[in-house]
Amino acid sequence: MTTKQIEATILGQSYRLACSPDTEAALLEAVARVDAEMTKIRSMSNVRGTDRIAVMAALSLASELLKLQYSVRHGEAFPAEEIRRTMRQMNEKLGAVLDQHEAL
């Protein structure tokens, strides 16, 4: 798989990151999310020092992820891929029923 180098800026600091072309958009979205979270923490708290801000941002983002995972496990939210798979299965079943009906 081909990898490429991209430049990303988080909290004013430049980083060179490697990724495959098909994951570049997701990586850039993640960079933007981390940058936004770190910027928010820096502006809304007394936390100083990039390492401490990064830890606080990581904890905040991990908390969001855990809440989302909890929601999915308890049926409050559904991952998009699961919805697509279910819709595909339903369409296949519906197609089979229609084929049987037409055969009669």
Image: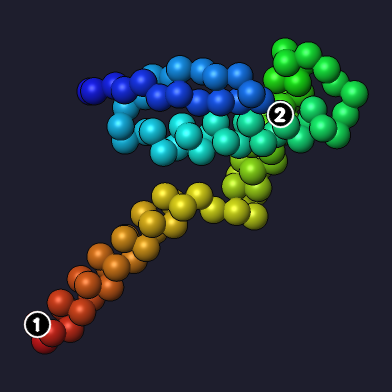
Q: Residue 53 carries which label?
A: none
According to the image, label 1 marks what residue? 103
Q: Is residue 55 visible?
A: no
Left or right of 90, for residue 67: right
- Give the foreground label among 2 and 1: 2
Residue 85 vs residue 48, the one in the foreground: 48
According to the image, label 2 marks what residue? 38
Q: Colour scheme in the image?
A: rainbow
Q: Can residue 4 be seen in this view?
A: yes
Amino acid under disc 1: Ala
SS for dot 1: helix
Place of residue 23 in the rendered image (x, y in percent of width and height, measured from the top left): 37, 33
Amino acid under disc 2: Met
Total numbered labels: 2
Seen in the picture, residue 80 relative to 61 is either above or below; the reply is below
Seen in the picture, residue 66 relative to 59 is either above or below; the reply is below
